[in-house]
Amino acid sequence: MLQRTPLYATHVASGGRMVEFAGHQLPVQYPSGPTAEHQAVRSAAGLFDIDHMGQFELAGPDAERCLLHLQVWDVTQMAEGDAHYSLLCYADGTVVDDIFLYKLPGRWLIVVNAANRAKDWAWIESHLAGHAVTLTDRSDELAMLALQGPQAATILQKLTHQPLAQIPQRSALTLELGGVKAIAGRTGYTGEDGFELYVPAEQVVEFWQLLLESGQTEGLLACGLAARDSLRFEAGMPLYGHELSPQITPLEARLGWTISWQLPFIGRDALLKTKLEKPQRLLVGLEMVDKAVPREQYAVAADGQIVGQVTSGMKSPTLGKFLAMAYVPAQYSALGTVLDVIVRDQPKQAVVVKRPFYRRSAP
Amino acid sequence: MADYKLDRSVRYAKSHEWVRVEEGIATVGVSDFAQDALSDVVYVDLPEVGSTLSAGKQAATVESVKAAEEVNAPVSGVVIEVNPVLTDKPEQINEEPYAAWFFKVRPTDRLADELAALFSPDDYAAFVAGLG
């Protein structure tokens, strides 16, 4: 059964093209089109309905201790209001999900991918025995939006007297925005400055309109899933089901920086072994030398032999280049290595390049 | 359902290509419905000049932000020209689908029959309306 977010009717009324994504009906684009939406986020701002994502609340005296076991980031280093990216790993070191953690007053918020919501819930719950904690699913009562782009702070500031400069990158504040009680985390999935906003589900329709009106002069556009994907792709961020899966370790995905090796997290022993032996395959960035669109699941070849696979690929709207992320054996992962992407049975030359493909200039 | 532009000087294939025959030369592109369904076009793979195309068979590939789609030849013939503008500005397909031609062919003596098998503009409009 496909789920609809509270904004479903709003999306349809404004010409959103609805598609199925992770069991939800969401707009893949609005009439302005994915390229225009992408550019709006890079140059002004974009607004996304990301209510398909799940939010679990973990509270109780053992919550922090529990998290040291459940996920890979050192949460003891997080102050109240801090937010951080992390991973849940299986005992064999592969990835259950990538998550975002918020340390809120007296509780933790764990933000998970829509496609993994049920799986993550079951997995987390199965590791809570013996801990004085409560796990609560807030996904239905909290609506989640993303306001992203260089003008995001200017747009949001119009809705509150509280100076948003108080919210540094990767931290969160509970505040009133246009009369709506919200949690605003200064983070996102686009490579731009911006906010992920949590508001009561019953107020999200009016809040969405409020944000769109507030951003009218700045050129704020409502954005769909296609722009969300191309933005995160350029910014080098993994998407679960593409760059991450139960067959992939964080070391292969080059997410070793998230791991606090001194902590007793699930999967540590397996990952430590991989770390010492070096991963045999690695995620790389590819730039097409021959003109062709590299797409997910296309084969990657070296010297006429298939050695890997594209996980995400497209024509980068910002850079105008044909780019891909792919897994290849470690010996083909050095920058400058020449490989082929097989496009409709034809080998098309590509070269290993640095990720992220796009990095915003310092403000 | 959106209102699609219709060019009255062309005939349409069921697979959403259009063909315009002028002075014995057939020019081929994709319909407004096709470009809208594709979403933003990012690349086209055009046939080689001199290659022989068969009606209803793949002649080119159009790649959008969504997917790669086949473009079929609505009529048979030999390719005499491809549109160089599309290589640099594939977005023209979204902006002006009836100006953004893909290739031109010198048709065969089967042209009249092949054209007769295609939709008239009104029949194509009815066909597209039925897809909604």
Image (tube, coloured by chain):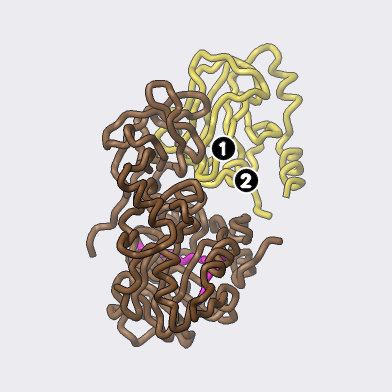
Is the C terminus of chain A in the top left, top right, bottom left or bottom right quadrant? bottom left
User: Which numbered dot is residue B5?
Assistant: 2
At 39% from the left and 36% from the top, the residue drawn is A328
Residue A181 placement, left or right of B20:
left
Q: What element carries label 2?
A: loop
At 58% from the left and 65% from the top, the residue drawn is A122
| Residue A243 place in picture, x, y as percent | 45, 48
Seen from the viewer's position, the closer of residues A237 and A362 is A237
| Residue A324 place in picture, x, y as percent | 40, 41
Q: For chain B, give the colour.
A: yellow
At 56% from the left and 65% from the top, the residue drawn is A52
Res A41 quadrant in image = bottom left
| Residue A234 place in picture, x, y as percent | 37, 50
Q: Report crowding for label 2: few under 14, some 14 to 19, many 20 or more residues within 10 A (C-alpha).
A: few
Seen from the viewer's position, the closer of residues A295 and A328 is A328
Q: Which of marks 1 and 2 is nearer the N terminus?
A: 2
Between the C-alphas of marks 1 and 2, the distance is 9 Å
Asked whether disc 1 touches disc 2, contact meaning CB atoms under 8 Å apart, the reply is yes
Q: Report crowding for label 1: few under 14, some 14 to 19, many 20 or more residues within 10 A (C-alpha).
A: many
Q: Name the residue under label 1.
A: B98
Q: Do tags 1 and 2 sit on the same chain?
A: yes
| Residue A42 place in picture, x, y as percent | 35, 58
| Residue A47 is inside the magenta segment | yes
> What residue type is disc 2 on?
Lys
In the image, the chain rendered in brown is A
Q: Give the range drawn in magenta.
A: A44-56
User: Which numbered dot is residue A120?
Assistant: none
